[in-house]
């Protein structure tokens, strides 16, 4: 097997997956390189789509270039290397990470944040009629499918079925409605939820408000409707009903990748890499991990970007500490956090512990925090500075994607779309 970076004298730090939990470290690649480390990021794409902006990306409140971070740029700018590939397995005994492309990389320390997929679906797989809501980049494929419903010659309404009434399912339904309105698509949107309420883990007021809101926007809400099978055009519920659709969106929860189990590493029940309070694998002390793909102390924290992002500084510290033999830091999950749903009509539904409010201010707050956060990672301490100059330096295929289907301009919510905040201090968002 080809060795991409045969171990020389420099210790190698591998970032497996360039997700939200890795951003803090990737932005500090230069510090790791100055420590004398070889830094390698393995990710299937140079871009990470920021999940808090994903529903707004669907409705083109944000353009793709507003909502994505060039993780390749982050790592290469700091003197690290980017490998466009997927991790296939981890060989703990020989300290190798094996890539789908056939190569392997030896690690001295590794941070693993591979994100998640949707139960029942292989990551990265979308079928013509079915789009899993994870990984987040699937949102672009969903938008294309919604837009293709414009070509409806018949009088029959097109139907989008969202399976799962959690936060992601509700936000997708709200923003799909906006796509229909903006493009004059004659369509119905239906949410099928197995439980007896939407937003199951939210306070009662939030559950009532989201249901009221969705119904007021013409979205059909089917509660107590567990979808147990989907084939082209039809979903089957546990009680024998059939729901027809043109496009189905699967938003039924989160599933970590199988890689950890298959590699013989200790995992939680759902296959997430079991990490201790230092975010360190209990099987391999050289491996750390965060975000959706880990089981924190054996259990899944809520799979939210707010936790992934807060884990970033701990991962960065502990990767360095383990190589220098210094004390590790603990990750202490925050008890309360603000979560704002983008309702697609210029309002948001904000939930903070037991507090719930809906309105334009909630959406503006979310949008402000999200934009500010993303900009700090888009052009960090950057000599390139302006977006124009930056995109000129992208390879043609990536620069071209900046032009594709950008729909309505960013900033429709009144926020500035100007790129390039260059503050050198990263502020942690309390909301994504
Ligand atoms: C529609 C939607 C809206 C959401 N909104 C919010 C929100 O408002 N607030 C909030 O807190 N959370 C939100 N979330 C949840 C949030 O997306 C996740 O919790 C967060 O993305 C987890 O970050 P992560 O670092 O674990 O993984 P991710 O950020 O998903 O990144 C994983 C990375 O690993 C890469 N990868 C995957 N497999 C491999 C492999 N085999 N090899 C190499 N690389 C790989 C992926 O390409 C990706 O770059 C939302 C989710 C969805 C679906």
Image (tube, rainbow, N blue to C red):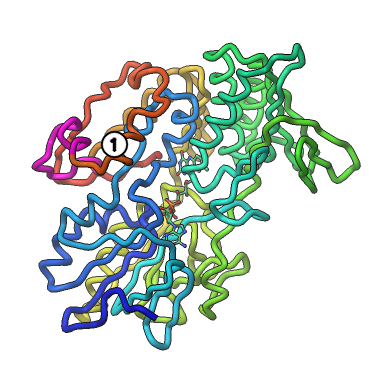
Q: In the image, is the residue at mark 1 within 8 Å of ligand 1 by its beta carbon?
A: no
Is 51 one of the magenta-colored residues?
no
Is 391 one of the magenta-colored residues?
yes
Instruction: Find residue 372 and report its horizontal and vertical position in percent.
Output: 27, 34
Q: Quadrant of residue 188?
A: top right
Disc 1, SS: helix
Query: Residue extending furthest bottom?
Result: 93
Taking the spot 22% from the left edge, 30% from the top edge, the residue there is 419
Instruction: Find residue 55 and report its horizontal and vertical position in percent.
Output: 49, 32
- Image quarter in which the C terminus is found: top left
Name the residue carrying label 1: 399
Taking the spot 63% from the left edge, 23% from the top edge, the residue there is 149
Q: Quadrant of residue 162?
A: top right
- Circle 1 packing at 10 Å, graded few (<14), some (14-19), many (20+), is some
Q: Is residue 337 left or right of residue 202?
A: left
Q: Quadrant of residue 90?
A: bottom left
Q: Is residue 133 left or right of residue 30?
A: right
Q: Is residue 361 above or below residue 127?
A: above
Q: Is residue 380 left or right of residue 284?
A: left
Please name whichever residue, 160 or 164, is drawn nearer the observer in this view of the structure: 160
Specify the segment rendered in magenta: 377-392
- Image quarter in which the N terminus is found: bottom left
Residue 171 visible in rendering: no
Please name whichever residue, 376 or 204, is drawn nearer the observer in this view of the structure: 376
Residue 428 visible in rendering: yes
Instruction: Find residue 347 and report its horizontal and vertical position in percent.
Output: 48, 20
């Amino acid at each position: 097997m080809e060795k991409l970076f045969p171990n020389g004298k420099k210790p190698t730090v591998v970032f497996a997956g360039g997700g939200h939990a890795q951003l803090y470290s990737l932005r500090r690649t230069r510090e790791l390189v100055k420590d004398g480390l070889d830094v390698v990021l393995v990710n299937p794409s140079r871009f990470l789509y920021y999940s808090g902006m994903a529903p707004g990306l669907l409705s083109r409140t944000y353009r793709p270039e507003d909502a994505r971070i060039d993780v390749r740029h982050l790592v290469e700018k700091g003197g690290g290397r980017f490998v466009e590939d997927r991790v296939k397995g981890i060989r703990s005994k020989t300290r190798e990470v094996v890539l789908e492309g056939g190569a392997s990389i030896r690690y001295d320390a590794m941070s693993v944040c591979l994100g998640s997929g949707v139960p029942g679906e292989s990551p990265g797989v979308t079928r013509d009629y079915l789009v899993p809501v994870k990984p987040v980049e699937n949102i672009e494929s969903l938008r294309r499918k919604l837009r293709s419903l414009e070509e409806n010659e018949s009088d029959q309404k097109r139907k989008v079925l969202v399976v799962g009434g959690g936060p992601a399912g509700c936000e997708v339904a709200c923003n799909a409605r906006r796509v229909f309105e903006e493009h004059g698509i004659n369509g119905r949107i239906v949410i099928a939820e197995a439980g007896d309420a939407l937003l199951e883990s939210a306070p009662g007021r939030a559950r009532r408000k989201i249901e009221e809101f969705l119904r007021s926007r013409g979205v059909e809400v089917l509660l107590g409707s567990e979808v147990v099978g989907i084939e082209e055009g039809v979903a089957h519920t546990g009680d024998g009903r059939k729901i027809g659709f043109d496009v189905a969106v699967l938003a039924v929860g989160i599933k970590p990748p199988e890689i950890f189990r298959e590699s013989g590493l200790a995992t939680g029940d759902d296959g997430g890499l079991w990490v201790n309070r230092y975010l360190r694998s209990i099987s391999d002390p050289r491996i750390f991990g965060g975000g959706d793909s880990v089981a924190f102390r054996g259990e899944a924290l809520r799979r939210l970007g707010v936790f992934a992002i807060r884990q970033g500084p701990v991962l960065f510290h502990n990767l360095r500490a383990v190589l220098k033999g210094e004390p590790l830091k603990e990750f202490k999950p925050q008890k309360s956090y603000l979560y704002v749903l983008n309702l697609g009509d210029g309002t948001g539904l904000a939930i903070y512990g037991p507090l719930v409010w809906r309105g334009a201010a909630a959406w503006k707050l979310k949008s402000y925090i999200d934009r500010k956060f993303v900009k700090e990672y888009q052009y960090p301490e950057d000599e390139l500075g302006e977006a124009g100059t930056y995109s000129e330096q992208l390879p043609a295929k990536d620069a071209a994607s900046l032009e594709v289907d950008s729909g309505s301009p960013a900033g429709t919510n009144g926020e500035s779309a100007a790129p390039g905040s260059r503050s050198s201090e990263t502020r942690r968002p309390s909301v994504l």
